[in-house]
Image (cartoon, rainbow, N blue to C red):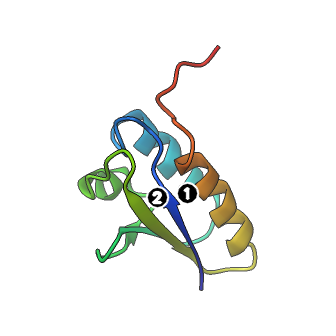
Amino acid sequence: MAQRTVVVASRVGLHARPAKVFTQAASASGLPVTIAKAGGTPVDAASILRVMALAVGHGEEVTLAAEGADADAVLEDLASLLATDLDAERP
């Protein structure tokens, strides 16, 4: 099982828009992906309700895990999303 640990950059954490963007990407990956706070129970990364229920705040660390042929690439993409402020205004 591949894993990545990343610090959440969005200024409101994984709530509303950032959670939607992240869960849609996790779902589109086609792999079973989980996300967990440090020491917490992993949840389905494709479920917006479960991801929001984690109450991950700005600057908190989460661990992503996935299994499958492209797991490393999928986790790199998802980690990159989380390391970006998804609340920043787009030009």
31 and 11: which one is in front?
Answer: 11
Relative to 3, is 7 above or below?
A: above
Residue 7: x and y in percent read 47, 55
Judging from the image, what secondary structure is the residue with disc 1 in?
helix
Callout 1: few (<14), some (14-19), or many (20+) C-alpha neighbours within 10 Å? many
* Residue type, numbered disc 1: Ala
Q: Which labelled disc corresponds to residue 46? A: 2
**Mark 1 or mark 2: whose residue is earlier in sequence:** 1
Residue 33 shows in this picture: no
- How many numbered marks appear? 2
The C terminus - image quarter: top right
Residue 47: x and y in percent read 39, 57
Q: Which labelled disc corresponds to residue 86? A: none
Relative to 57, is 79 above or below?
A: below
For label 1, the residue is 26
Residue 50 shows in this picture: yes
Q: Residue at x 29, y 74 (%)?
A: 40
Residue 11: x and y in percent read 39, 35
**Side of 39 where 26 appears, left or right:** right
